Each structure stands twice: as structure tokens, then as C-alpha cells.
Amino acid sequence: MMKTAVILTFLMSALAAAHAQETEKERMNRDLEVAESILSTMIKQGAGKRQIDIPFHVSGEYKNGKAQFNVPSNGMTRIIFSGGNFRRDFEENCPGNVTVFKLGENGDRPEKATEIRWSAHRMKQKAEKKKEKNDPQEKGKGKDRSEDESDEPAQFKLLPNGFEAQFPQLLDSIDTRFDERLVAVAKTFIADYGDLLSFLKDDEKIAVTTRDNQNDHPVFLNKNQRYAAVEAKVSDVRQYKKGGITREQLMQRIVVSQGLMKEEMKVDYELLQTIFNRLYRSDLSKTFFCRPIAYNEEDGQGITFRMKTYSSNRTNNGYDMPTLGKTNVSQAERDKLVKELYPKFEEDLTANILEYGRTLKSLKSNETLTFEVTYTQCKGCQIPESASYSIKMSDLSDYSSGKINLRKAMSRMVIKKGDNQ
């Protein structure tokens, strides 16, 4: 009887713990979604009434002790939400009369453009390429024609000479204004609404950053794309809310970083990416495998590689596990194998980070090499949803030169794990 009571008590405790964990996860997701909506609205509000109805979504995520909100920042987004007047900025930064020809009742008549038509230049280029392709003798002729000599069927003239050289000045102006607005809005958001993220612990952080620095249209291409990041400690936000510090003091404690995400790919970063892409392909890895690994560099902080791991491919008869050479595996067997593979994967990954990470030459001694890993799905397997593995370049240099051994280097690696699945 006593044994039965003990078993029942244990089962009830386990169920209560599982329920509490699920409830906490639901609260986290709710808090993140509410905060996403608040920040999205704040960014749109500052850009003017006409931008309120434009689709725009900030995505939030909790990973490794940080609630991070990723703000889209492609070229068109920056123009729309920079809070300025694009046409006015164009006229100021790209001087010259842009003339269009419109067909009227009395024939062609020129008038100043009231609308910038980006298609004109592309239409002319496409027409010339098509003509050259169909008639080799036409090759190169289009380059010597003046705008007035154009036989382009479109009713729009070309953009002014020097447009391509002057347009980056306009983009710089838009980038600067967008980043200034984003930083101001992010600071206000963190100060006024950061405490709504009730699931965060005092030693964790809230961050707002631009996520997509790739432009969505050829006309907005720029060699050096900008990024902005705003970060605060949860303890500072809560201290401000309780009256422990003033708003001005909180603003001073919020960390702002801005700079350029360089387009030039550094050879050693590309090589390390290639190495890990090869190591964790399904035909070579003995644990989990990955899709192509991505990375991004932030000035003064280091480089972060992002891996999404997989253990199996779903089939009509269950699962195939290519790294183990198993086919038609059941769900239960698959989960059991994933649980067994996890510690081996982590052991190999940390060793590979040290072994191949020391080949980096572009990182400074105070900068960090980080691998952020999203783990294969396995509910109830007691493995984390995600984890980050970081080490300073100075420690990698010490390991490479023989100043410290593998065990010592391992001890200097900082590992942060998310919640268990």
C-alpha cells in the first residue's frame, strides 16, 4: 500500500512539473507575441499615417537567455519606415530634371516627372540585350546612343546621367534616418514595455536588432549594409519600473551598437563554413546532420555560425536515419536513438570548434567565435531546443600555439542551453 502511494505521489509530481513547464512555455510565447505587436506598431506609428496599414512584422524569439526582436531592414522597408519623404530626398541627393514623355492628344509632350519610374532603365537594357541576341551586328550599338536617339518603345525617358553614382548618397541618408528611428523606438519599447516579458530572469537580456541586411531589389544594392542593435539587462528595466533608477539612468545603461555588415566575404570565414558544411553532411556525420550553415559577422564582437540539426527524414513507413544507415525506424526507436546521439554530437561539435576554429585569422583576440545550434525535434527526450557554444579568439590562439591543452581549451568554452524539448 505504501509502495503504491509513493508511486502515485511520484507520478502526480511528474505530471505537475510537466504541466508547469508547458504553462511557462505558453506564457513565454504569449509575452513574445504581444511584444512583437507592440514594437511593430511603434515602428509604423513613427513613419506616418500612410504606413500604418502596410504589412510589417517584427519576429521575437527567446534563445540562450535573451529575448530578441528581429526587425526587417531590407531596402524597401528602410525607405517606407525611415520617417522621411523619399521623393524630396531623391530630388536633393540626385539633382537633375527627370523628364518623361507622355502621349497626349497633340502628340508627344514633355513634362517634369511626378513619379519616378524605375522600370525605364531596366526596360531599355533588356530591349538592347534582346536585340543584340537576335542580331549580333547590333552588339555595342546601344551604348553610344543618346537618350533622345533611343528607339525604345516605352513612353519614358532614361533617368539622368550620374543617377547610379548619386543614388548611394540617398541610401546613406535613408539608412542613417532609419537606424536613428529604430534606436529611439527600441529604447522606448524596452523602457516602457520590457517588463511585460515576465518569463525573463533578472540576469537575462532584451534585444532589438535588424535581421535582414540583404536588399530586396537591385536598385537598392549597397556594398556595405548597415545594422543596428539595442540591448538591455532585464534587471535594469525592472529596477527602473520599481523606481530604483531614473529613466535617464536606464537609457545610459542600454547598449547600442551600429555599424556596417561588410559584404566582402573573408576567406577564412568561408573556409570554416565549408568545413562544417562538409563535416555535418549526412554521408559523413555519425550523429546529426545539417542543412547549409549560415554565418554573420558583427564589428567588434566576432562571428556567429548558425546550425539547424536533423536526425532523420520522415517516410511513409516511419523514419530514415541516414547517419546511422537505418531505414523505416519507428517514432519510439527514432527518439531513443536521438537521445543517445545527442551527447556524442555535442562532444564532437565542441572538439571540432576548437580544432578548426583556430584556423581563423580575421578575428581579433578579444572577439568571439560562436556556434548557435537549433537541435533536431525530439519531444520528451530531455535534449535542449537550442544551445550556443562560444570561445574567445585569444583562447583559440593559446590552444593552437600549444599554451593550453584540449581539456583546458574545452573548459574555456562558454555553453548556454535553452529549455529542454
Image (cartoon, rainbow, N blue to C red):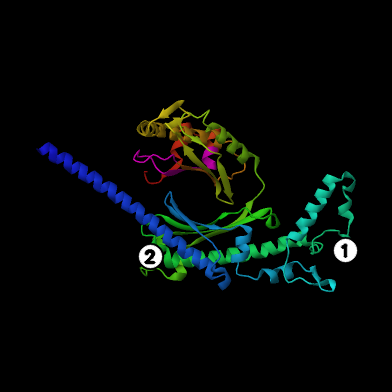
Image mark for residue 239: 2
For the record, the magenta segment spans 375-396
* On screen, residue 125 above or below 332: below
Q: Residue at x 55, y 50 (%)?
A: 301
Mark 1: which amino acid? Asp
Mark 2: which amino acid? Gln
* On screen, residue 221 above or below 351: below
Q: Residue at x 62, y 37 (%)?
A: 271
Q: Position of residue 351 (x, y in %)?
A: 48, 33
Q: Quadrant of the N terminus?
A: top left
Residue 164, located in which quarter of the rendered image?
bottom right
393 magenta-colored: yes
Of mark 1 and mark 2, the one earlier in the sequence is: 1
Mark 2 residue element: helix
Q: How many marks?
A: 2
In the image: residue 167, left or right of residue 107: left
Residue 73, located in which quarter of the rendered image?
bottom right
Q: Residue at x 56, y 73 (%)?
A: 49
Q: Position of residue 107 (x, y in %)?
A: 85, 71
* On screen, residue 178 above or below 363: below
Q: Residue at x 54, y 62 (%)?
A: 55
Residue 343 versus residue 285: which sits nearer the camera? Answer: 285
Q: Quadrant of the C terminus?
A: top left
* Residue 96 visible from this viewpoint: no
* Residue 349 visible from this viewpoint: yes
Mark 1 residue element: helix
- What residue occupies the far left of the structure in this picture? 1
In the image: residue 166, left or right of residue 19: right
* On screen, residue 379 above or below 89: above
| Residue that badge 1 annotates | 148
Q: Position of residue 11 (x, y in %)?
A: 21, 42
